[in-house]
Amino acid sequence: MRFILVLLQAILAGAAVAQEPLPPPLADIGSALSGQQPVPPALGAYLKTWLEPAEPFRIVGPLYYVGTKGLAAYLITTPAGHVLLDGGMPDSAEAIEDSIHKLGFDPRDIKFLLITHAHIDHAGTMAYFVHLSGGSAVVMDRDFDQLKSGGKIDPVYGTRPPFYFPEVTAERVLKDWDVLTLGDIKMTALLGAGHTRGATTWVTTIEDDGRSYNVVFPCCTSVNPLYRLAVRPSYPGIVDDFRRTFRMLESMKPDIWLPAHTQVPGFAEKLARADKDGVQGWVDPQGYRRWLSEEKTKFEAALAKEK
């Protein structure tokens, strides 16, 4: 649920944009988060992007974007089969499938389904693609139960049915620094807990035109709306988890970093640059450091506000 907290703050400050009616899944989530019905326009406009189809595109080497306008999903292809990292809301499964076909790949060749964390906006399509492809669902050990429950044991959203998603029992359960290999691709899983107990940053190396690129899918830095840190924390140890996550992310030195939500500052600009500069349009180590510093400042401010 990244970035929704910022939108909620904007709503309270009086922000407003034009809004069409939201489909029930998004309307229910928006009402649960804002406590308002109908959903405030700014939040509704943001949530709508979660289901809006987007044109797929290549980022670097065998790494492609296949998500919606608001929620990222990444396909990594190999001769031995493919990896799908993250998905989206359950109702966006067919749009993601269509995007994979548009790129000339068969989603039935997906061998591994990965997620950054077990929330409906990233794990909601996992069951669909496990059934379609017969591939293996892979998850960090600390998110295994949440994924298996379909979100029903989330410490905050577990009492709110709009946040439930199709249940998935992962075949592969990983621990911090475990490596997943498919063909010539190696994906390293790093525990980035706080956003969920088992939130996961994925790291890989991608070859393109004779050069190697360090690619990081960072997760997770934001505090979920309705979660608490210091006073009646949403789960024991959440602050320590976030601080370990920031230390881990600060140790990363990506050439290319790819977020789970496209509203992360710089994503649209890099996509535009890539139209002209190709892969180099995505190379952004300075942007990563700047984004991470800003996220850490936001976290510390949220923590201080509770004390």
Image: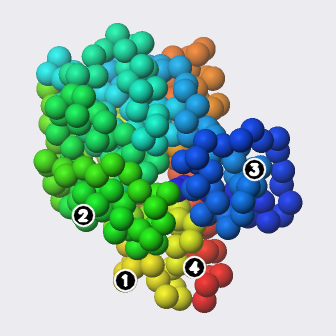
Query: Is disc 4 in contact with disc 3, using a CB cutoff of under 8 Å?
Result: no
Question: Who comes first in sequence, dot 4 or dot 1?
Answer: 1
User: Does the rendering let one see residue 133?
Assistant: yes
C-alpha distance separating marks 3 and 1:
33 Å
Question: Who comes first in sequence, dot 4 or dot 3?
Answer: 3
Residue shown at the point (57%, 60%) measured from the top left: 295
Residue shown at the point (42%, 12%) measured from the top left: 102
25 versus 293 height, above or below: above
Question: Who comes first in sequence, dot 3 or dot 1?
Answer: 3
Number of residues whose C-alpha sits closer than 10 Å to that of mark 4, classed few (under 14), some (14–19) or many (20 or more)? some
> Is 107 or 36 nearer to us in this picture?
36
Q: Quadrant of residue 105?
A: top left
> Is 264 or 95 nearer to us in this picture?
95
Query: Is disc 4 in contact with disc 1, using a CB cutoff of under 8 Å?
Result: no
C-alpha distance separating marks 2 and 4:
27 Å
Q: Which residue is mark 2?
A: 145
